[in-house]
Image: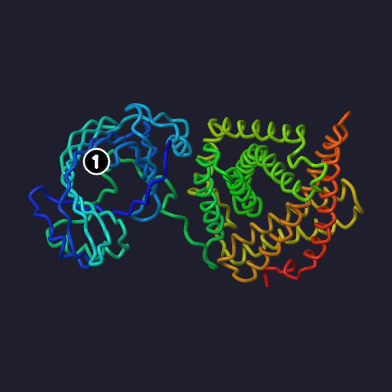
């Protein structure tokens, strides 16, 4: 089974084979240098035929020798930092499934294959502070590298590596001068594999000119959307492995990211080519619907289990009635299996490609180049007006299905406004944050109401069954009573929340 390792924080230096070791005890903060430890490390690196992992600064290797032998997956976690995930050695030519689950979102259907073999003769020096704290490890590496894809080469080089253990990031700065005095220089390669592959190393994947530009009041309006999409894409990539591994809440978080992207595209659709926006929005809607099957069953089951605690203990078994538990369990299992199947399809991988392409090369129209503050104010205000119309329409139906449908529409429009206001908080400041907070409050209240609508429909249907055992019938009746009370309560809370002045805020002023 894979296990998360520490966050690796290291810097590499190029050194000539004849370069003398630095005086490590001269590094400010270092009191003691332990006796060196030598290891011979053999590592086989894996990637796809197109080097999809290398393009994202991701390393996958199987290493023998040393104290941390096994499979190592290293994912970027900021400058000079990578998150390590480990798995046992297993078979030499078979990547563990638990590591693959972290990589499908990047490999997108491509197979993994060996691309290089590196043999490293490593001498490690542990560096300690005056109080005995293990600050860092200094490694002197002699590397022999053989690549088999996309080019076949053999190389030898020497490099030094400082990896923090308990030391702070400023330790790198303290060590820099000591190492520089020997003639060593910061490595121009992010990893040993990058140096081995050399000129065949792929261009870094991601925004064409680095991270999306931070939105500015007078900057182009398109920057607001690309920055917001970038954050949501990162969330989707982060939670994709969790969904595959059935990590709690991962499906919810992934669906939330998907919905937010679709909401942003709907709000800012006039800034971009209409056909591209529609196609991408439709695909996001498709993915959200797939994720929703498992998530809705999961939420319903947990909701009703909590309500059981409110029922009188006499006459109640304390567990969900069998038919109810079976139906929700079956719905979750079927929904989750559909999610897993979907995440392995070409359609899903094409959606990931389309999202990154839209972010990196937005199909902008003329309006997208105009000042963000003015353009976004108008579009967010339009979402606010849309919500106001939905609230007005919800006043007409007195009760019943029409009333529930109208309140559900208010909830959806409140969610769109919330996301729109959140996307411009950095530009419109306090006004946008207050608007987002009020819209979120409305959305949450009506979310509970919609959950009660769905729960009442399910309970009513099951309670109508013939020959129900008395305790089952009582459980259904008790749960229905609770849901009806929740529906009345949420309507009261909605009426109060809808009167909040913050919902009347407009960004254009």
Displayed quadrant of residue 394: bottom right
Q: What is the count of numbered marks?
A: 1
The vertical placement of 51 against 312, above or below, is above
In depth, the one of 219 and 344 nearer the eye is 344
Query: Element type at marker 1?
Result: loop
Q: Residue furthest bottom?
A: 509
Q: Is residue 199 left or right of residue 15?
A: right
Image quadrant in which you'd find residue 370: bottom right
Colour setting: rainbow
Q: Residue furthest front?
A: 314
Task: Identify the residue at horizontal 18%, vertical 62% (top origin).
Answer: 32
Q: Name the quarter where the C terminus is drawn.
A: bottom right
Q: Position of residue 391 (x, y in %)?
A: 81, 58
For mark 1, what is the residue?
66
Q: Residue 205: horizontal and vertical position, in percent?
A: 41, 45
Q: Position of residue 255 (x, y in %)?
A: 61, 45
**Where, by quadrant of the figure, is residue 492 drawn?**
bottom right
Q: Residue at x 62, y 34 (%)?
A: 336
Residue at the (62%, 71%) spot, across then down: 430
What residue is shown at x 87% (from left), y 45% (from top)? 401
């Amino acid at each position: 089974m894979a296990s998360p390792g520490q966050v690796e924080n290291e810097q590499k230096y190029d050194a000539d084979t004849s370069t003398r070791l630095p005086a490590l005890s001269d590094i400010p903060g270092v009191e003691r240098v332990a006796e060196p430890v030598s290891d011979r490390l053999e590592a086989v690196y894996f990637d796809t035929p197109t080097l999809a992992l290398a393009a994202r600064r991701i390393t996958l290797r199987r290493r023998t020798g040393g104290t941390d032998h096994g499979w190592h997956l290293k994912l970027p976690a900021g400058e000079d930092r990578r998150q390590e995930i480990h798995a046992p050695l297993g078979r030499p030519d078979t990547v563990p499934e638990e590591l693959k689950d972290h990589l499908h979102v990047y490999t997108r259907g491509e197979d993994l294959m060996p691309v290089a073999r590196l043999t490293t003769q490593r001498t490690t020096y542990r560096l300690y502070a005056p109080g005995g704290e293990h600050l860092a490890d200094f490694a002197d590496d002699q590397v022999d590298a053989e690549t088999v894809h996309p080019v076949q080469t053999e190389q030898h080089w020497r490099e030094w590596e400082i990896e923090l253990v308990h030391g702070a990031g400023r330790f790198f700065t303290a060590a820099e001068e000591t190492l520089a005095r020997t003639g060593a220089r910061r490595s121009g390669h992010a990893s040993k594999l990058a140096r081995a592959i050399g000129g065949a190393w792929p261009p870094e994947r991601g925004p064409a000119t680095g991270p999306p530009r931070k939105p500015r009041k007078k900057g182009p309006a398109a920057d607001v959307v690309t920055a917001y999409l970038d954050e949501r894409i990162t969330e989707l990539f982060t939670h994709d492995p969790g969904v595959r591994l059935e990590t709690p809440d991962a499906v919810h978080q992934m669906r939330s990211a998907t919905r937010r992207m679709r909401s942003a595209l709907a709000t800012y659709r006039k800034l971009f080519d209409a056909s591209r926006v529609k196609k991408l929005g439709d695909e996001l809607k498709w993915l959200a619907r797939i994720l929703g099957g498992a998530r809705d069953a999961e939420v319903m089951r947990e909701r009703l289990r909590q309500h059981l605690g409110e029922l009188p203990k006499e006459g109640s078994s304390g567990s969900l009635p069998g038919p109810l538990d079976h139906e929700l369990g079956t719905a979750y299992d079927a929904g989750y299996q559909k999610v897993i199947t979907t995440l392995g399809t070409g359609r899903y991988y094409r959606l990931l490609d389309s999202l990154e392409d839209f972010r990196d090369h937005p199909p902008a129209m003329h309006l997208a180049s105009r000042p963000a503050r003015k353009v976004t104010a108008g579009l967010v205000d339009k979402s606010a007006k849309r919500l106001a119309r939905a609230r007005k329409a919800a006043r007409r139906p007195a009760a019943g299905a029409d009333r529930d449908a109208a309140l559900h529409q208010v909830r959806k429009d409140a969610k769109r406004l919330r996301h729109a206001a959140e996307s411009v908080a950095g530009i419109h400041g306090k006004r946008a944050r207050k608007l987002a907070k009020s819209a979120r409050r409305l959305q949450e209240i009506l979310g509970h109401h919609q959950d009660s609508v769905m729960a009442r429909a399910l309970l009513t249907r099951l309670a109508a069954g013939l020959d129900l055992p008395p305790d089952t019938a009582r459980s259904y009746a008790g749960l229905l009573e609770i849901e009806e009370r929740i529906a009345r309560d949420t309507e009261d809370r909605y009426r109060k929340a809808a009167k909040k002045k913050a919902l009347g805020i407009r960004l254009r002023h």
